[in-house]
Amino acid sequence: MEMRHLHALLKQRHSLGQLEPKGGKLAFVTVPRENLRGLLTELRDVHGFTHLVLLTAVDWMEDGLFQLTYMLNNRGRDMTLGIRVMLDRQEAQGDSIHDLWPTAATYQRELKEMFGIDFPGSPRIDEEFILEGWTDLPPYRRDFDSLAYSQQTYAERPGRVTHDPREYMKSKLYPDGV
Amino acid sequence: MGLREVLTPFTVWKHVFDEPVTIKNPIGRPAADRYRGFHQNDMASCIGCGTCEAICQNAAIDMVPVDGIETRTGDSGLRPQIDYGRCCWCALCVDVCMTGSLTMSNEYTWVDTDPDAFRFVPGLEEPWKDDEEGYEREGKRVLSGIERIHMEEMPPETRISNFEEIVDGYSRAEAILEADRCVECGLCVATCPAHMSIPDYIAAVRDQDYDRGLEILYETNPFSEVCGRVCTHKCETSCAALHEGDPIAIRWLKRHIVDEVPFDRRLELIGKPAAPTGRKVAIIGAGPAGLTAAFDLARAGHGVVVFEALSHAGGMMRYGIPEYRLPYEALDRDIGVIEAMGVEIRTNCRVGRDVTMDALRRDYDSVILAIGLNMGRSTRVPGTEGPGVEKAVDLLRRITDGEEVPVPERLVVIGGGNVAMDIARSMARLQMQKYGRVGVTLTALEDIDHFLADREEIVESREEGVQIFDARGPQEVVRDESGAVTGLRTWRVKSIFDADGRFAPAYDEGDEQIHEGTMVIEAIGQMADTSLLEEALTEALEWNRGRIRIDGAFRTSEPWLFAAGDAVKGPDVINAVADGHRVARTVMDELAAREVMQ
Ligand SMILES: Cc1cc2nc3c(=O)[nH]c(=O)nc-3n(C[C@H](O)[C@H](O)[C@H](O)COP(=O)(O)OP(=O)(O)OC[C@H]3O[C@@H](n4cnc5c(N)ncnc54)[C@H](O)[C@@H]3O)c2cc1C
Ligand code: SF4
Ligand code: SF4
Ligand code: SF4
């Protein structure tokens, strides 16, 4: 069964967006949050997508959305399907799937720490993952200012000097401004 | 706790005599091929744009001078120095690098007791500086756009029968995309003769703040609407973006800003001049040099009168540059702002005929000469005397004035510069209107790769049907028994300059051609008409190879007289603008100094 077939079949029971194929073996599809669980379960139990490859997020700050991407793989058929769910960025809350795939708990903990997206009920969700004693905005949010953070957090070794290329060229090539 | 958990720690004892998996001394152990280790930088291709510094989220990079690397056009002479106490090896700097000079070796082990040793300029003497392994970006930069946003133009078949403007200008959406490609490095600023704040006004486009953009333009250039269309845009030849793609369309973005601000709003933004000082300055010539000086002086509150021989202001911007490149309304708006500052422009008033230099010297505190180069030069080959042979600048002036000019079915232009292209393309339009087809032949000494004209002028001329014969030296304007012109006789050029670099064309006399045409137009250069000076002043002034000698501040050898623009320097509008600012500053300094003396 190829991707388009599968999509047509699933569409009969789930509210799915358009299929976005990326070559023969990989495709993406967007679903409403309330459809996610049902779809994942069917893919896992009926269509052989038994492997959760990864769960990750994109910050669409300007649109006020977080995008979650669940990559599922059917090993037998060598097919990968990316399921996207858009979340309200303000609310920043997703639905835990650790009971479907235990590994999801780890991804969810990472997303909580790096993006501030909560997954209520996910094991150890509030424990520190790799950041220790982090007090700032979650660092993968696009409004987190990495440069300002590193300047505040890490001391500058004395003796550093920099030059603005434009001003430096002026001083060398036309010091009196003409 | 079960028995297993209690016993497990002891089971590891069986490994106690095994070879350790970790390495005691990691020095010398090679990393993977694509490992991101200490940076490498090809000093010769890095241009010191500082984009690596700007992107580094750890503030690990400083731009510093390096011995042996000079500051020059398109290269700041600075190079990135990296503080490895801060670097996190993310390679963003490598990915963003405008030239691809910055890469990373796979070298990562290094022990030193001096922490300052870990702050250095990559590419100088590290042992790994030429290593092949390590991380480099695949292909060209991807974090800023490579290709210029396309500019719509009128196609040749539509534009050839009229003088309407060819270039459309960007829409807002297009301009934002083009502005987005600029990394704000500022390398281009040094190249612009007026040192316009290019990255700042491009940022204003990106921010959609056209009021701010316009104010920035006016800080350095009161002819931004003109320059946004016809500037020689040398800045674009030093743009950081050209190393792996198209340079930013700096000229078109400038034009876009002015196009977006209505004229009345422009006047509001520029505001009123300072209170009158009571000082008066006379300016001879209403070209870009004279009018820029007038703008600066008037804004500072000085009384300014500009004397202009022709019926309209603008100089070569009006009487040279054809309308299809620069519509008169665009020029009129730039001049309108200058007049709104209180500058009086007396047209149809030729100094030397309608008013004398002596009178100006007497009635004004200072006099600025900005008379341009308005007389066409002649090849002086046999046959150039007499009817049927014209000078490009004379014809262009008459076309602008709306005079009826003779339009033959076939004509020959001599010259390979932009003026030659302008007259060829103007005459082609007139021929199209009169005969429905183009009959222009253009001959030049240079071979096509060394034409002085811009590439786009050559391309567009050909698209419009101009036939170009390169490396042809004019020998004679051929005339029939009645004296009427029938063509131009040329020989093939073997070389233009002699061994000492002097102009001395050598020809292959065996390769002769007659280019047919009943008119020959010479477009080989212009010279100044300095007859207005009259004898005494001509004698008194110091000269330099036929031009009035000026110092770096545009003073002539006479303390009351200053000179600027094409007549003393050149060669284009933006240089005239830069000169205008400079001469105005000198005049203001002198006026202030005299104030103190009195
Ligand atoms: C055909 C042509 C095309 C060009 N195209 C371009 C281009 O695309 N881009 C670009 O940047 N540059 C271009 N240039 C060059 C540019 O126009 C000039 O460099 C610029 O106009 C010089 O400015 P200026 O003020 O020194 O002199 P001008 O513009 O020549 O102005 C001098 C003024 O002084 C007046 N004058 C002279 N003698 C007297 C007198 N005795 N009394 C009163 N008034 C007098 C003249 O009538 C004229 O109006 C072109 C030039 C020509 C000829
Ligand atoms: S971005 Fe590249 S070219 Fe520019 S200064 Fe840095 S290393 Fe040099
Ligand atoms: S690798 Fe990253 S942290 Fe290091 S200098 Fe480059 S941009 Fe900065
Ligand atoms: S236009 Fe080019 S050279 Fe100028 S600031 Fe932008 S990228 Fe740098």
Image (cartoon, grey):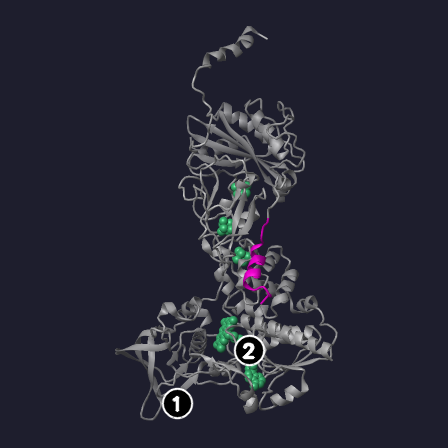
Residue at the bottom extreme, as displayed? B482
Tell which circle, 2 or 1, labels the residue nearer the N-terminal end. Answer: 1
Q: How crowded is mark 1: few (under 14 residues within 10 Å), some or many (20 or more)?
A: few
Q: Residues within 10 Å of mark 2 (few under 14, many from 20)?
A: many
Mark 2 to mark 1 CA distance (whole Å): 35 Å
Residue at the front extreme, as displayed? B113
Are discs 2 and 1 less than 8 Å apart at CB? no
Q: In this view, does B155 lie to the left or right of B349?
A: left
Q: Which residue is drawn at 66% across and 30% down?
A: A133
Give the numbered dot on residue A50.
none
Taking depth in this image into account, of B529 and B542 the one nearest to the observer is B542
Taking depth in this image into account, of A91 and B247 the one nearest to the observer is B247
Q: Is residue B51 left or right of residue B268?
A: left
Q: Does the magenta stretch include residue A51?
A: no
Give the numbered dot on residue B550.
2
Q: Mark 1 points at which residue?
A: B385
Q: In which quarter of the image is the C terminus of chain B?
A: bottom right
Residue at the left extreme, as displayed? B510
Query: Residue A161 at x, y = what percent?
Result: 59, 49
Query: Residue A125 at x, y = what percent?
Result: 63, 26
- Residue B524: tell me if it is visible: yes
Region of the chain picked out in magenta, as a range: A161-178
Q: Is mark 2 on a helix, strand or loop?
A: loop
